[in-house]
Image (cartoon, rainbow, N blue to C red):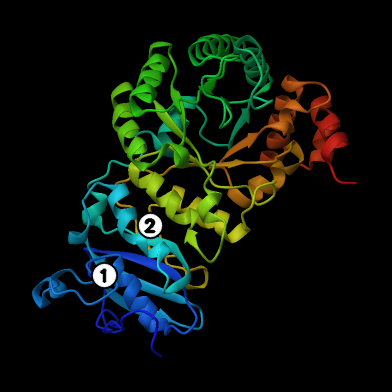
Amino acid sequence: MQSGVTKMRRDYIDRDYSPKNTDLICEFHLEPSEGVDFEEAATHMAGESSIDSWTEIATLSPELAAKLKPYVFYVDEEAQTVRVAYSEELFELGSVPQVLSAVAGNILSMKIVDNLRLQDIAFPKSMLREFKGPNFGLSGIRKLVGVQDRPLIGTIVKPKVGLTSEKHAEVAYNSFAGGCDLVKDDENLTDQKFNGFEKRAELTLKLAEKAESETGERKMYLCNITAPTCKEMIRRMNILKDLGASYAMIDVVPAGWTALQTLREEAEDVGLVLHAHRCMHSAYTRNPRHGISMVVVAKLCRLIGLDQLHIGTVVGKMHGEKHEVLTLRDECVLDNVPADESQHVLAQDWGELKPMFPVASGGLAPTMIPDLYSIFGKDVIMQFGGGIHAHPMGTAAGAAACRQALEASLEGVTLQEYAKSHKELEVALGKWLKK
């Protein structure tokens, strides 16, 4: 069927092509515009994301096309799925922004498609070698915190914004004292007048140290360094290091990929763990028919070298089906992620790149810990907000209730049974357990 654009030859579709070990592979969900043949749309998309244009161009020589052309090697019109193999020579090695400009750039705006979504991406080892991956990663964080055999418990200081630096530090201290391993800022708290970055960092880190001396446990404060410029984020990172911090937090999508790659280099020099908050990701990941999947975002974060990443909860308030969240978990923690045709997951061998620590966060209460432990196992950071601070006995009791619920899960005891000898958990069950 003839479309409204100049018809392009279909020499990018080759179902017999076997991807090379130097090819970057992408899977797309593709919905052609009305009147456009599926294969025509697929070959236009492949060409636009690599060497071609919307019409025949004289400057594209046969020699160049033979060397650099993409291959649409998998086409499933019924499932609206295509897979494209791109030569590594099309990309600036070590540059996430350039890769995205190609495989998720202009093609998302083409009139020839109604919807187009980058579902997954798999990197060849030749490209992986250009990235450092996480500096600490899952094992490094466990060593830093001194906890090997259980999930970590974290919280976000609430309310999100509005607290003074002093009150913020007090809430963090109560969280630490009650049993939290980590306390973090929320995504929209950076350097506001009522709670300046430097003062908040200094006061909160001092009280984290106090909680460490009282509990005998390591306590980590994740201060948000997101800022208008890379220069300012680096400055804030160095302030944290001078204050004795071990962590920095960054809003990865608003900050941008170039900023993340810059911060990854700086974080290694100052020795800070990088916590990745994924706020704003749904602007392009939530629509299942258009944009970019969260799986791609997670892979890029591990490639660049973030140490831990929010992946969803399954049981909390945030959007995310179980299979998607578990796929994200696998991309964080596995060295080799096997292909799963049913869920459109491409195989990925991460080589020497360390695993990230997955974070389950969003609308969690202590009563959900048994389910969280059943879903994720021990390698997860369970992060609570209102589920700690809305505890009727206060923040410290809320944190204690979470640790008690986790202890019950680790021992294989029901929360109701464990609550008989743990008041904080008993009160939490009365507030949050469904009748």
> Residue farthest to the left?
63
Q: Is residue 160 above or below residue 243?
A: below
- Is the N terminus in the top left, top right, bottom left or bottom right quadrant? bottom left
Report the residue at 39% width, 16% height from top: 241
The answer to whether residue 43 is visible is yes
> Residue farthest to the right?
435
Query: Where does label 1 land, which residue?
Result: 53
Give the numbered dot on residue 144.
Answer: none
Q: Which amino acid type is marked by label 2?
A: Asn
Residue 221 at x, y = what percent? 53, 21
The answer to whether residue 404 is visible is no
Q: In this view, does 163 lie above or below 143?
A: above
Q: What element carries label 1?
A: loop
Residue 209 at x, y = what percent? 53, 11
Q: How crowded is mark 2: few (under 14 residues within 10 Å), some or many (20 or more)?
A: few
Q: What element carries label 2?
A: strand
Ranked by sequence position, the earlier of labels 2 and 1 is 1
Query: Where does label 2 land, which residue?
Result: 336
> Residue farthest to the front?
4
Q: How many labels does the image show?
A: 2
Q: Which of 375 and 80 is in front in this view?
A: 80
Left or right of residue 304, residue 277 in this image: right
